């Protein structure tokens, strides 16, 4: 079994900062991309940022310059440093990871349970 467990969500005033963390554990050998998505009430889930094992990064335009994604390949973790938070950043944030087994067979994309981030005005 595979688990992705997020932590670090909460309530923060507009302009404040918050860091989310996600740890992957279970039966897999390696991780391709890891990323963060978010879903606000009444809206579709959207990409926030992704990072490959080699360090290539993609950010949503709405968070460029404010959020930083990073990962620790040795610990199978990914983090999202969020600064200058806005009320529009309020959403449930989900971690995901693309996993492979020891034969490099793709196991699929796994998701965490989500963590609430609320930016108050």
Image (cartoon, rainbow, N blue to C red):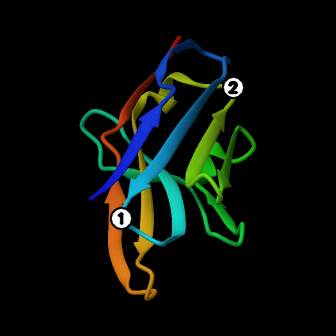
Q: In the image, which disc is placed on residue 84?
A: 2
In this rendering, which labeled residue sits more in front, label 1 or label 2?
A: 1
Q: Is residue 42 above or below residue 18?
A: below
User: Is residue 47 rendered to the left or right of residue 63?
Assistant: left
Q: Secondary structure at mark 2?
A: loop
Mark linked to residue 27: 1
Quadrant of the drawing holding the N terminus:
bottom left
Q: Residue at x 64, y 69 (%)?
A: 53
Crowding around mark 2 (Cα neighbors within 10 Å: few <14, some 14 to 19, many 20+) is: some
Which one is in front, 73 or 53? 73
Residue 55 appears at what percent x and percent y? 72, 66
Marks 1 and 2, the one that precedes in the sequence? 1
Side (left or right) of 108 relative to 55:
left
> Please, is residue 106 above or below residue 6 in the view?
below
Query: Where's residue 64, x and y in %?
Result: 69, 48
Q: CA distance from mark 1 to mark 2?
A: 37 Å
Quadrant of residue 12 in the image?
top right
Horizontal side of residue 3 vs 51, given as left or right? left
Against 33, residue 3 (above or below) is: above
Q: Is residue 14 left or right of residue 91?
A: right
Give residue 36's mark.
Answer: none
């Amino acid at each position: 079994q595979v688990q992705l467990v997020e932590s670090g969500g909460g309530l923060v005033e507009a302009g404040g900062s918050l860091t989310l963390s996600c740890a992957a554990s279970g039966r897999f050998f390696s991780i391709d991309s890891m990323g963060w998505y978010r879903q606000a009430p009444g809206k579709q889930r959207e990409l926030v940022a992704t990072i490959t094992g080699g360090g290539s990064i993609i950010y949503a335009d709405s968070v460029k310059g404010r959020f930083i994604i990073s990962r620790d390949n040795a610990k199978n973790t990914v983090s999202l440093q969020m600064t200058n938070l806005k009320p529009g950043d309020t959403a449930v944030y989900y971690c995901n990871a693309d996993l492979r087994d020891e034969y490099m067979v793709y196991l699929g994309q796994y998701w965490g349970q989500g963590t609430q981030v609320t930016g108050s005005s």
